[in-house]
Amino acid sequence: MIDIHSHILPNIDDGSENMEMSLAMLRTSVASGVTDIIATPHVNRHGVIPAWQTIEEKAEELKRAAQEQQIPIRIHTGAEIEFNGDVMRFLEKGSRDYCLAGSPYVLLEFTDQTQPDIAEHMLFALQLRGFWPVLAHIERFPQILADKERLLSWAEKGILYQCNAGSFTGYFGPKCQTRVEELYHNGLIHFLGSDGHRVEFRTTDLREAHEVLDKLAAKEKKESLWQQAEANAQFILKGRVLYPDVPQKWQKKKKGFFSRLFG
Ligand SMILES: [Fe+2]
């Protein structure tokens, strides 16, 4: 598996507090079947923009420590960028700073205040600069998910959606779970991430979500989102364009859709 969203770098945001914790988080990732993890520290949160060089240096340090400890995982650089007008100042055309694994993909985080109309203009402006937006844990933003037509039209225009694995297990509450199920039902989840911050809570552990997704796939007799998300994430690592199919119409989730999982 490839975890495209994590806060494993020590001492840079509200994620890992030190190298020891970072290594423990990586061990959990490996136990979850993760071979590649993208470090995506918060950038532009409350206006704080760590230098790209700092992110690269911290990732190098962690790589070295993981190697010494013989933890079999590849670490890639990235960022989770809070999405407001300021991004146009530091996401410069042609630069790959703050991008995922040196690709044109950028992981963008909305806030509760994000206005869909304004976001739309900015997303397309970023695309014109050559960036390929991935929206972080889109299931957390009811104001965005309320407009299904827009959600579909963004996907049509190449905007991609990441969801947190923990949303499938109910870790982020019943509302997030319902929303992630709707997105799943509509085939609108392109990437999965742990969004892991710590070792005791909000961890990098993906095992429970993996089990939920595989059970669901077995019941529906189709490929598990676990596999699809991994295949999709390969496009990020290779810096290749991913242009998945988008449903023509939003399908309402059937009653009891997810309860069948445990039925
Ligand atoms: Fe995050």
Image (spheres, rainbow, N blue to C red):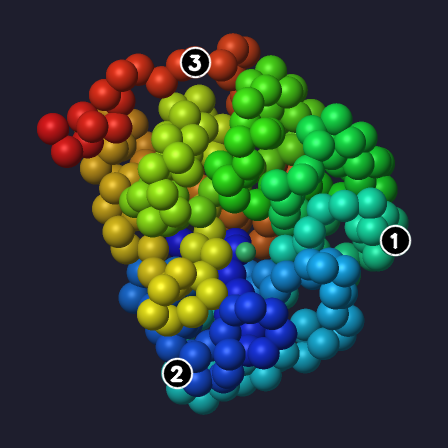
Residue 46 numbered tag: none
Return the residue at label 3: 251
Q: Quadrant of ligand 1?
A: bottom right
Return the residue at label 1: 89
How far apart marks 2 and 1 lie (CA) works out to 39 Å
Q: Residue at x 55, y 68 (%)?
A: 14
Nearer to us: label 2 or label 1: 1
How far apart marks 3 and 2 lie (CA) works out to 46 Å
Badge 1 density bin: few <14, some 14–19, many ≥20, Cα 10 Å: few
Nearer to us: label 3 or label 2: 3
* First in sequence: mark 2 vs mark 1: 2
Up/down of 133 relative to 91, above or below = above
Image coords of residue 183 (percent x, y): 45, 28
Mark 3: C-beta under 8 Å from nearest atom of ligand 1: no
Residue 207 in sight: yes
- Image quadrant containing the C terminus: top left
Disc 3 element: loop
Q: Are marks 3 and 2 in contact (CB under 8 Å)?
A: no
Q: Residue at x 34, y 70 (%)?
A: 200
Image coords of residue 16 (percent x, y): 50, 74
Nearer-the-camera pick, 140 or 70: 140
Residue 70 numbered tag: 2
Three-letter amino acid code at the position of disc 2: Gln
State left or right for residue 119 relative to residue 91.
left
Three-letter amino acid code at the position of disc 3: Gln
Q: Residue at x 72, y 59 (%)?
A: 46
Badge 2 density bin: few <14, some 14–19, many ≥20, Cα 10 Å: few
Image coords of residue 198 (percent x, y): 42, 69
Disc 2 element: loop
Residue 134 in sight: no
* First in sequence: mark 3 vs mark 1: 1
